[in-house]
Image (cartoon, rainbow, N blue to C red):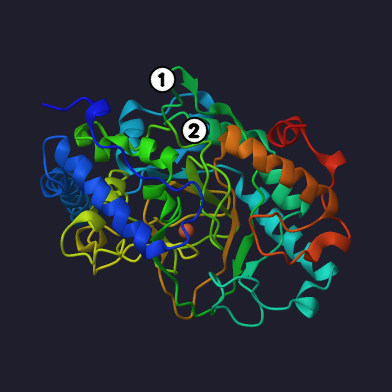
Amino acid sequence: MSVPTAVLPALPHWETTPDDLRAAVREVKAALRARIAASGRPVEEVFAVVEQRVAAQVAEIAAESERGEPVWPVIDYADIAAGTVSPELLAKLQRRGCAVIRGHFPREQALEWDAAIVDYVERNRFFETYRGPGDDFFGTVGSKPEIYPIYWSPAQMQARQSERMARVQAFLNGRWRHESEGVTWFEPDRDCLYPDRIRRRPPGADSAGLGTHLDPGTLDLWMTRANQAAFRHLFDGTVEQYDPWDAAHRTAGPQYPGSTMTSVFRTFQGWTALSDMDHDQGVLHTVPIPEAMAYLMLRPLLADVPEDDMCGVTVGKVFPANEQWHPLLMNAVTGIPDVRAGDSVWWHCDMVHGVAPVTDQKGWGNVMYIPAAPWCPRNADYAVQVREALRSGASPSDFPAEHYERTWDGRFGVDDLSAVGRRGLGL
Ligand SMILES: [Fe+2]
């Protein structure tokens, strides 16, 4: 029996980063626990419900792996274009929260883009002028970067503003519930054009990879009014109704700033492969369980976590997922299958992900980061900044202010925008 939400104790909230983080963590944790308890079950019981559901998924994934079945859904672009993706595959996408889109672009097209990017950076003497990593998150690479802080090459923009990209983004946005409570939280058929970087990792490379983490926010996930509403079912006794595909309250609220923050709401994070990559060459891994977010959000409220600690989550750092606090989830970490140039890879914005280490990499490991970021108030705000950055060739405001391309020859210009590109920038 659930208690009406209105009679539950209200939660304190901070619409900007609290001055005293530890005090705020103590306060919000106590309030969340009190609210959950008042709804009829203590937090331990609510967490146990979530743990059981997630454990069932972990077991399912282990069984699939053991049988040699693909854990990641693989969807043919042609089926998305024709509207013929099978109900079974759609259900699997919903359950796993991630997918590879085969043949999103013709392989030749992707290889051409890869070569065009090399030409663009070499022509503009990028390697001679490169000043080292501009942020701490990817700051482990050597003098020649693997992550190129390059945003405005014609190749990247052609992919972002292509009909094929728009079609896949609309398909992926459509997995979410975008209307409820009389509000249209986002427009599934219109994406906001989000410029991000590229990665080019050469043959023979050694890479330590990237630890498992998630990107939707940090302490603001528990502390802002909008996020408390977005995760309401976890805190008001209705945890069984928690739906990781519900966009309610996720597309307009404030975020706490940080070096790893993304200003936009993304239904899926994603990249497009510009080279062939085998599954054992330091590729992306996820915990392919969208419901795991409930586990990650409730875990810090248990008694074994220090009162002023959110399982290591704090502002200005990525949200870590690890053996210490989330051993159950770590059992389900699963890599992508082999991909070819022109395939794309997508994962739900709340999902735990990381990059496996590799030594002496075989072949290239090249990707363009392009997410699905549907039009909504938050993304429309950011589009204003993107338009400005496109005009001047600046680094977009979500990224370090490196601004390599301002004077570069052959940069993509406003006049080169297609109808999809203009729509994605609000022009
Ligand atoms: Fe990430």
Callout 2 amino acid: Asn
The answer to which of marks 1 and 2 sits earlier in the sequence is 2
Query: Regarding mark 2 in the picture, which secondary structure is present there?
Result: helix
For the C terminus, the image quarter is top right
Which picture quadrant has residue 323?
bottom left
Tell me which residue sits at (24%, 61%) in the image.
326
Q: Give whichever of 306, 277 is nearer the camera.
A: 306
**Image side of residue 197 versus residue 353, left or right:** right
Q: Position of residue 195 (x, y in %)?
A: 67, 50
Q: Is residue 69 visible?
A: no
Callout 1 amino acid: Glu
Can you tell which mark lies on residue 173?
2
**Image side of residue 1 versus residue 298, left or right:** left
Query: Circle 1 is placed at which residue position?
Result: 181
Q: Give whichever of 277, 91 is nearer the camera.
A: 91
Q: Is residue 328 above or below residue 377?
A: below
Tell me which residue sits at (19%, 55%) in the image.
62
Q: Is residue 354 visible?
A: yes
